[in-house]
């Protein structure tokens, strides 16, 4: 392995280290840790972020003019994005025993209803919940029905956890709005997927121009994982939800998307409204534009149409922003 490869590997490890530290602090539930997390993250926000955008006659007038000339940013509803697992919680286990952590509550409930021997047999074990199911079944049905009764009880209880998990995902997807960025302007799959085959634009943002501290605090790196978070499990561990519950879900994506190297600006309903009575009905199913900053540069796709290029250059001139065009060369994609 070359020395440069080792250096790059070390840099990647350092990058993951700060991200892991940030997330631990951010989700600890301690106000002091929360502030430390935000300070740590500010040190690592990339100086340049990029946003790939499609062009159509409708989107140019409706969104690109606002983004380029007025410095607006469209915050998407999760349903508008291309990943069906956006901001969802996925249960990590099929067995309710994996979620039973309040042993103390059960011991109090059954302390005076069991013999000392039965109590010890059930609760003096790491498998206390399975033992408890067996005990309840044996006390309720004939011996030949014990196993089927345990299975039925497990299905009913697991169904309740599934309902909790579904409610967590539904609430998060209704509440959060996302604006997606990446750290590179020459990602060919992203040019293809998000600019309709190199016919759109990539907007370059200078993050040092962001003066709104709320937006700085709500700009997050994305964490790529093998499985989406199990927020039901975290809630049952009595995680303090007021510190980043929905942020946590919205910044995780499956590793299939790792090539995007994404950062996200995340708002929720509380970013705009004081209470449920203030939220308009159309908010629950639509995205929302916010004041942001103007792009520092516009990069046009190498297959942009002549008509759209003329319009984008017109917008760029109005905003005083340089506009360049990506070109295909013998050495790959070149951005002047």
Image: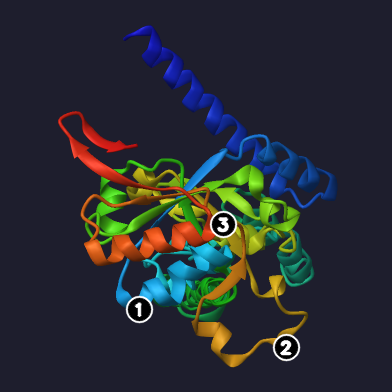
Task: Quickly name the residue at label 1.
Answer: 58
Circle 1 residues within 10 Å: few <14, some 14–19, many ≥20: few
Circle 3 residues within 10 Å: few <14, some 14–19, many ≥20: many
In the image, residue 287 lies at what x, y percent?
Answer: 51, 76
- Of the two numbered discs 1 and 3 on the same chain, state the one appearing first in sequence: 1
In the picture, measured across the screen, residue 283 lies left or right of residue 243, that is left
Query: Looking at the image, which is closer to me, 95 or 21?
Result: 21
Q: In this view, does 298 lie above or below 58?
A: above
Q: Which residue is drawn at 70% across and 75% down?
A: 272
Q: In this view, does 277 lie above or below 264?
A: below
Q: In this view, does 194 lie above or below 296?
A: below
- Label disc, if present, on residue 278 of the rendered structure: 2
Query: Looking at the image, which is closer to me, 32 or 331?
Result: 331
Front disc: 2 or 3? 3
Judge whether residue 234 can be spotted in this image.
Answer: yes
At numbered mark 2, what does the secondary structure look like: helix, strand or loop?
helix
At numbered mark 1, what does the secondary structure look like: helix, strand or loop?
helix
Q: How far apart are marks 2 and 3 (CA)?
A: 29 Å
Q: Distance between the residues labelled 1 and 3?
A: 20 Å
Q: In which quarter of the image is residue 84?
A: bottom left
Q: In which quarter of the image is residue 277?
A: bottom right
Give the quarter of the figure containing the N terminus: top left
Query: Looking at the image, which is closer to me, 286 or 254?
Result: 286
Task: Quickly name the residue at label 3.
Answer: 294
In the image, residue 288 lies at what x, y percent?
Answer: 55, 75
Coloring basis for residues: rainbow
């Amino acid at each position: 392995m070359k020395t440069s490869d080792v250096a790059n590997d070390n840099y990647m490890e350092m990058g993951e280290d700060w991200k892991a530290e940030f997330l631990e602090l951010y989700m600890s539930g301690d106000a002091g840790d929360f502030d430390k997390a935000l300070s740590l993250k500010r040190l690592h926000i990339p100086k340049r972020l990029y946003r790939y955008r499609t062009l159509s006659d409708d989107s140019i007038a409706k969104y690109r003019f606002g983004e380029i000339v007025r410095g607006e940013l469209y915050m998407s509803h999760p349903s508008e994005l291309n990943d069906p697992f956006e901001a969802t919680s996925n249960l990590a286990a099929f067995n309710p025993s994996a979620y039973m952590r309040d042993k103390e509550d059960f011991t109090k409930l059954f302390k005076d209803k069991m013999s000392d021997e039965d109590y010890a047999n059930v609760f003096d074990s790491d498998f206390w919940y399975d033992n408890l199911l067996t005990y309840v079944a044996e006390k309720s049905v004939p011996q030949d029905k014990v196993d089927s009764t345990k299975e039925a009880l497990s299905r009913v209880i697991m169904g309740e956890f599934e309902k909790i998990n579904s409610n967590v995902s539904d609430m998060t997807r209704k509440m959060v709005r996302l604006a997606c960025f990446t750290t590179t302007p020459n990602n060919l799959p992203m040019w293809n997927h998000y600019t309709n085959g190199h016919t759109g634009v990539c907007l370059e943002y200078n993050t040092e121009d962001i003066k709104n501290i709320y937006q700085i605090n709500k700009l997050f790196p994305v964490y790529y994982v093998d499985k989406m978070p199990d927020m039901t499990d975290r809630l049952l561990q009595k995680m303090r939800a007021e510190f980043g519950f929905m942020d946590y879900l919205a910044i995780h994506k499956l590793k299939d998307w790792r090539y995007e190297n994404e950062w996200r600006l995340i708002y929720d309903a509380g970013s705009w409204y004081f209470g449920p009575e203030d939220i308009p009905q159309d908010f629950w199913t639509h995205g929302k534009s916010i004041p942001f900053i103007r792009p520092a540069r516009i990069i046009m796709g190498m297959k942009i149409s002549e008509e759209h290029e003329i319009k984008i250059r017109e917008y760029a001139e109005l905003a005083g922003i340089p506009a360049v065009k990506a070109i295909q060369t013998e050495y790959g994609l070149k951005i002047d």
